[in-house]
Amino acid sequence: HIAETELTKMVKKTRADRGTVIVMNPRNGEILAFAVLPSYDPNEYNKFNLSIIKNWVLSDVYPPGSTFKVLTVASALENHRLTKDEKILDTGKITVQGWPIENYDYNIHPYPGQIDLKYLFEHSSNVGSVKVALKMTPDEFYNQLAKFGIGSKTGIDLPGESSGILPPTSTWDQSRHATIGFGYSIAATPIQMATAAAAIANGGFLVTPHVIKYSQEDYEKKIKRTRVLSPETCDTMKELLEESIR
């Protein structure tokens, strides 16, 4: 009820076409709240368009944008291409293969200069994220994103789930490599992003999300726990994310 109430407020405030709130226990994959808008009366489902009836949170993919920067930084840390205290030159805007990329707050902070990872998250730096992404080889970045479940179904116990899109590295030029760093040139479902973020929160284990509360025996059969990050990377990420919202 709280999730649906708050989601309704925010959809109205931002005049969004749709929205979702997913609340998950990161330790065991239990989905505690799952709010989706627009909604409909299931008793009269035949009166509504298919685009509303379907559970788009599972079936539709979208470029996750800045939420993806968490996975980019975690991937670089895990591949030892980045350190917690490393500084990155944020010039406010850059050009990659002829494509201009600039920070959303370029008019306010045109040249941030040497930034740390806390600043990157606080200001959602596109330039910083691009440079972090390009520190990795395409294979390193791709393989870690695949471990996070990008491009694969989560296995949630609901029908209609899509795999998302993680293009093979054979299609990556430098501009695609760069834009993936801040959540474009790929596509994911909201449940994929929630599951990947939960893996950082629970010490590096990707856990199958589920809406059914299973018995211990069934849980062990149906729910997978796969290590995708080291505990050290998770500790660093949690510290950086906590500091960035204080």
Image: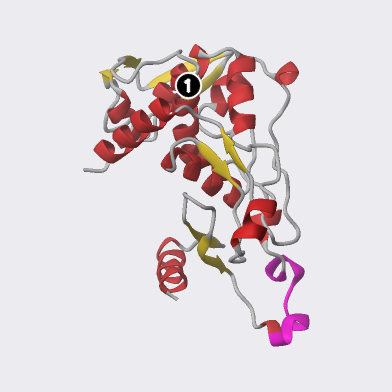
Figure colour scheme:
secondary structure
Name the quarter where the C terminus is drawn. top left
Figure quadrant of residue 202: top left
Instruction: Identify residue type, mark 1.
Output: Glu
Q: How many marks?
A: 1
Q: Nearer the viewer, residue 47 or 210?
A: 210
According to the picture, the residue beneath numbered tag 1 turns out to be 78
Name the quarter where the N terminus is drawn. bottom left
Q: Nearer the viewer, residue 127 or 74?
A: 74
In the image, residue 76 sits, relative to residue 225, either above or below, namely above
**Which residue is at a point 68% across and 63% down the rendered structure image?**
55
Residue 102 in view of the camera:
no
Question: Which residues are drawn in magenta?
Answer: 43-53
* Rendered location of residue 8, percent (x, y): 45, 71
233 on left or right of 175 = left
223 on left or right of 134 = right
* Rendered location of residue 91, percent (x, y): 34, 17
- Callout 1: helix, strand or loop? helix
In the image, residue 16 sits, relative to residue 122, either above or below, namely below
Q: Nearer the viewer, residue 88 or 224?
A: 224
* Rendered location of residue 229, percent (x, y): 50, 29
Q: Residue furthest front?
A: 217
Mainly helix, strand or loop, the magenta region? helix
Residue 159 among those drawn in magenta: no
**Which residue is at a point 68% across and 32% down the rendered structure image?**
166
Q: Residue furthest bottom?
A: 43
* Rendered location of residue 206, percent (x, y): 56, 41
211 on left or right of 103 = right
Residue 199 in view of the camera:
yes
**Which residue is at a point 42% across and 42% down the rendered structure image?**
201
